[in-house]
Image (cartoon, rainbow, N blue to C red):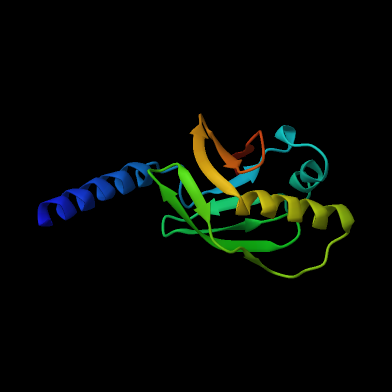
Amino acid sequence: MKKALGMMGLVLGLCACQSASDPGFYDNLWRLDASQVKGPLATAARSVKGITLKLSSDGRLSGEGGCNRYFADYQLVNGAAMTVGHIGSTKMACMGELMQAEGLYLDRLQKANWLERDGANLKLFSDGFESPLVFVPSP
């Protein structure tokens, strides 16, 4: 039993090290690629604040939703399968389409189930959506 628990801890530790070893993944700011989305999300992605995502190695995420700042806990399993906890945000009022876009984005973020690197980009897949949200490194 002790051997099994020890091996399981070693395997989990190795998985965490592999995903955390990518220096461009954690603690960097990612910006939603406006050319990869349509409608209100594209408008918000092109706005002054844009839509951003920062994943900290301590299991916290944060960013700009187009209008408000947001934050939540998240968990990655084997460096890719993703779950997001309750999302909180500031409560600034913005005009119509920005608020709509922020709601759409936060809904997709809440339903996130998979995260993967694609070259320099980060793809966020969500339950109920065919295509991922594509993020590019923020300058």
Image x and y of residue 117, in percent? 49, 35
Q: What is the x, y in percent for residue 88?
A: 63, 67
Q: Position of residue 25 (x, y in %)?
A: 46, 44
- Describe residue 105's horizontal placement relative to residue 113 as left or right: right
For the point 45% across and 58% down, which residue is it? 59
Q: Residue furthest top?
A: 119
> Residue 139: in sight, yes or no?
no
Residue at image location 68% in from the left, 38% down from the top? 33
Question: Against 91, is 13 above or below?
Answer: above
Identify the image quadrant of residue 46.
top right
- Height in image: 64 above or below 137? below
Q: Is residue 61 visible?
A: yes
Q: Residue at x 76, y 59 (%)?
A: 67
Left or right: 83 in relation to 3: right
Q: Residue furthest bottom?
A: 91
Tell me residue 83's x, y (percent).
51, 52
